[in-house]
């Protein structure tokens, strides 16, 4: 019975969800023969395999029409962008001369329950939350045409066991949920 409890207590399974974050969404189409700019905002660049996967997945959709760029004048991609302003969209449009902007944003929250660290043995629940948001902008019309957020939450007992080995898998599955929805969106 103790072995059974230890086995199930050490298995961690995140919960995943996909949310539409575009207010008043109306179906817009994407012209696949146009040019696309992928910008990663607040991204975990130290997760090399994950970054390569993201790049390759988008390249598989858009081929030579996809461009990757991380540096802009007066636009810091390291700080999380809650909302792009019209001026920022114009800046990106003018600097890149692309038709669409694919803004891929991440919020990674490794946090203890109740928002603070507690070293007591009675309160060793931990929580890891990943959010990946994809916003697609039509740069010719300066409008957002797609915005979805994929989130995952993993709660686990710390008990000296690290759930860090599952963090890459959790991050990839969170992205894959969003990416699959986006593929369906452009293929309709």
Image (cartoon, rainbow, N blue to C red):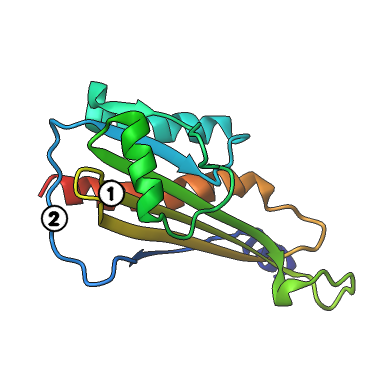
Q: Position of residue 78 (x, y in %)?
A: 58, 43
Q: Residue at x 53, y 30 (%)?
A: 49
* Residue 90 occupies quadrant: top left
Q: Position of residue 77 (x, y in %)?
A: 53, 42
Q: Position of residue 31 (x, y in %)?
A: 12, 39
Relative depth, front residue between 100 and 155: 100
Task: Tell me the element at label 2.
Answer: loop
Question: Residue 57: in sight, yes or no?
Answer: no
First in residue order: circle 1 vs circle 2: 2
Image point (80%, 76%), residue name: 123
Residue ID at (25%, 50%): 142
> Residue 74: x and y, percent?
52, 40
How many residues crowd mark 1 within 10 Å: few (<14), some (14–19), many (20+)? many
Q: Is residue 49 left or right of residue 58?
A: right
- The quarter of the rendered structure image containing the N terminus is bottom right
Residue underneath mark 2? 28
Question: Marks 1 and 2, how far apart in space?
Answer: 11 Å
Which is more toward the observer, 76 or 127?
76
Residue 29 appears in view: yes
- Residue annotated with mark 1: 137
């Amino acid at each position: 019975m103790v072995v059974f409890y230890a086995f199930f207590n050490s298995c961690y399974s995140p919960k995943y969800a996909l949310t539409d974050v575009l207010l008043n969404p109306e179906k817009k189409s994407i012209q696949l023969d146009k040019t696309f700019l992928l910008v990663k905002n607040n991204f975990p660049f130290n997760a090399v395999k994950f970054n390569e996967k993201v790049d390759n997945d988008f390249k598989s959709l858009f081929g030579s029409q996809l461009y990757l760029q991380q540096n802009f004048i007066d636009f810091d991609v390291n700080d999380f962008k809650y909302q792009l302003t019209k001026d920022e969209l114009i800046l990106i449009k003018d600097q890149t001369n692309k038709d669409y902007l694919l803004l891929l944003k991440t919020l990674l929250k490794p946090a203890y329950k109740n928002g603070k660290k507690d070293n007591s043995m009675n309160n060793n629940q931990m929580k890891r939350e990943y959010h990946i948001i994809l916003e697609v902008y039509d740069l010719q019309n300066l409008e957002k045409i797609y915005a979805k957020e994929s989130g995952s939450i993993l709660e686990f007992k710390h008990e000296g066991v690290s759930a860090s080995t599952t963090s890459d898998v959790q991050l990839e599955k969170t992205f894959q949920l969003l990416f699959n929805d986006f593929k369906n969106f452009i293929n309709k």
